Amino acid sequence: MSADITRIAANIPAMQNINILTKISDQIATHQLRLATGKRINSPAEDPAGYMLARGLESRKRGLQVALDNVSNAQNILDVAEGAYSNVMDILQTLKEKATQAADGSLNSTQRSAIDGQADALISEIDDLVDNTKFNGTKLIDGNYSTYFQTGESGSEQLQVSLGAADSASLGINDIDLSTANGASTAISTISSAIDTLSDHMKDLGEYKIRLQSKESNLSNAITNTESVRSTLEDADFAKEQMEVMKLQILQQTSLSSLTQANAAPQLVLSMFR
């Protein structure tokens, strides 16, 4: 737009410079906000599509993080159960030793009765272990623990875990008798079967732990990748933003200088009256 400096009622160049200066100042404010917040997108108005996508990625990341926490809790539960199973297994091995000892014909009835008493105490210890192995007040190895762990952000991503019973009745050792040689001989077979049963429970638990470890790794990778995409989309590039601010500050100064000159130009009209 051309301007006639002899017409002073409207200073068009000054108005143009004010508009430019306002736009530059707004752009500087935008870039400074990005530097202050660390985000390229601070409101939906800046990039509606980018803002919506970033919020979706953030929601996914937070869901994955909670799922990762769930996996960690599940691992803790299985660790508790595994420790209890191991203790029961140790007791079963000791019981088998006692049964083998009591089955020997060199012992008398008094000695076998003493061994039988020791076995009863060990069996009671197994049941005490089962009763006291809990997580958040729930017994883990009494045969009633079966639940679903949420291992992903969607409702279908679940892992069902069922833990086998390790109490003396379930293992079939609650009524073994080591007070006689025949009873002790029978008990050896019974205890061996109990060891095999418990080994199966521990195998199942180990398989659960392997699956949880795999899910933990997958979730960690998914969280990292999701956050990387969100960061690329939403986070500010500080070097770029600082460069833009410096460029705009120079333009701001030149625009201000141009505005000063534009405001001074109409004063030339005064020379016509000298």
Image (spheres, helix red, strand yellow):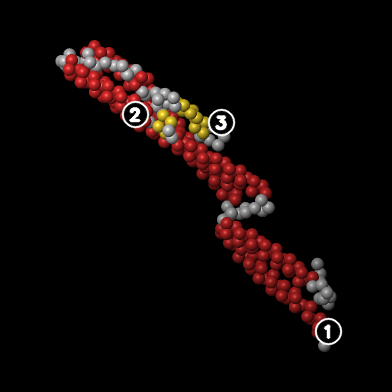
In-front residue for pair 151/271: 151
**Which element is circle 3 on?**
loop
Q: Quadrant of residue 237?
A: bottom right
Q: CA distance from mark 3 to mark 1?
A: 86 Å
One can see residue 125 in this view: yes
Residue occupying image coordinates x 39% and y 27%: 141
Quick one: label 3, few (<14), some, or many (20+) residues within 10 Å? few
Quick one: label 2, few (<14), some, or many (20+) residues within 10 Å? some
Name the residue tied to disc 3.
Answer: 156
Question: Given the image, on which type of amino acid does mark 3 rest?
Answer: Ser
Marks 3 and 1, the one that precedes in the sequence: 3
Q: Quadrant of residue 170?
A: top left
Q: Quadrant of the N terminus?
A: bottom right
One can see residue 89 in this view: no
Of circles 1 and 2, which is in front? 2
Name the residue tied to disc 1.
Answer: 272
> Where residue 88 sits: x, y (%)?
32, 26
| Left or right of residue 113, residue 147 in this image | right
Q: Are marks 1 and 2 in contact (CB under 8 Å)?
A: no
Question: Given the image, on which type of amino acid does mark 1 rest?
Answer: Met
| Left or right of residue 245, residue 263 in this image | right
Residue occupying image coordinates x 57% and y 49%: 232
Question: Given the image, on which type of amino acid does mark 2 rest?
Answer: Leu
Marks 1 and 2, the one that precedes in the sequence: 2
